[in-house]
Image (tube, rainbow, N blue to C red):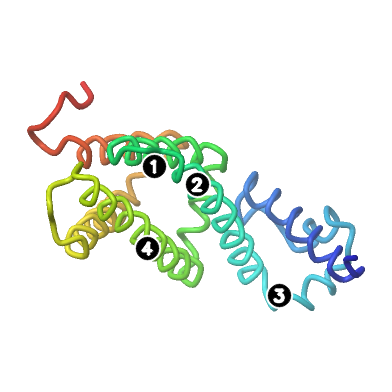
Amino acid sequence: MATQSEIKYKRLMEKAEELFVKLGYKAVSMDEIAEAAGISKMTIYKHFPSKEKLFLEVVLSLMDRVSAMFEEEMKEIPGTLEKINFMMNYNLKDSKNYSFAFYKDAMEIPYVTEKLLEEKYRRGREIFEWIIKEGVEKGEIRKVNTSIMTDMLMMMTEGFAEKYFDKIKTQEDPSTLAEGFYDFLKYGLLGGKGVE
């Protein structure tokens, strides 16, 4: 049975996530989080020394849940191209669950940005490596150096994100940019039909 402290912590994390996702980091105060969770601000500070640390923990926890669901669904998909399509569509669909303020604020806090990008890189690398390795084993991808191909995909992803971050001005921009990037990943410059 959960202790009172564990119940309060769970409620804190749920309400903080709800507010941050809907309004972003900057628009939410610790007082508002405490009120929504039905706890004192002092209780929040027992667990987190700052709003920044709370925000980071909320986002990492959210990433854990989304990744776990994603990986479970991914296991059921047989083909390499289908896995890539699923990954791209999943990310596009999932990105619509969060406010523009949530994304923008997360990328404007250096400490948070650094930690999130580290974690996103680690997870992305694992997924790309798994897809490529499995694709080679099934004969759906030509025999390649999995590690080098994974590094190349990660460099492209990071470079693209870095180059286009400043161009994101609306809620729709991340989806539009991601669709163009995914189209290039799937079809390259010359292969397949791609998008019009």
How many neighbours does mark 3 have within 10 angstroms: few (below 14), some (14-19), or many (20 or more)?
Answer: some
Q: Secondary structure at mark 4?
A: helix
Whole-angstrom CA distance, mark 1 to mark 2, is 8 Å
Residue position marked by numbered label 4 in the rendering: 121
At 89% from the left and 57% from the top, the residue drawn is: 38
Q: Are marks 1 and 2 in contact (CB under 8 Å)?
A: yes
Q: Earlier in the sequence, mark 1 or mark 2?
A: 2
Q: Earlier in the sequence, mark 4 or mark 3?
A: 3
Q: Which mark is residue 70?
A: 2
Residue 46: % across, % down: 79, 78
At 50% from the left and 42% from the top, the residue drawn is: 73
Q: Which mark is residue 48?
A: 3
Q: Earlier in the sequence, mark 4 or mark 1?
A: 1
At 80% from the left and 61% from the top, the residue drawn is: 31
Front label number (4 vs 2): 2
How many neighbours does mark 1 have within 10 angstroms: few (below 14), some (14-19), or many (20 or more)?
Answer: some
| Count of numbered circles in the view | 4
In the visual, does 105 lie left or right of 118?
A: right
Q: Earlier in the sequence, mark 3 or mark 2?
A: 3
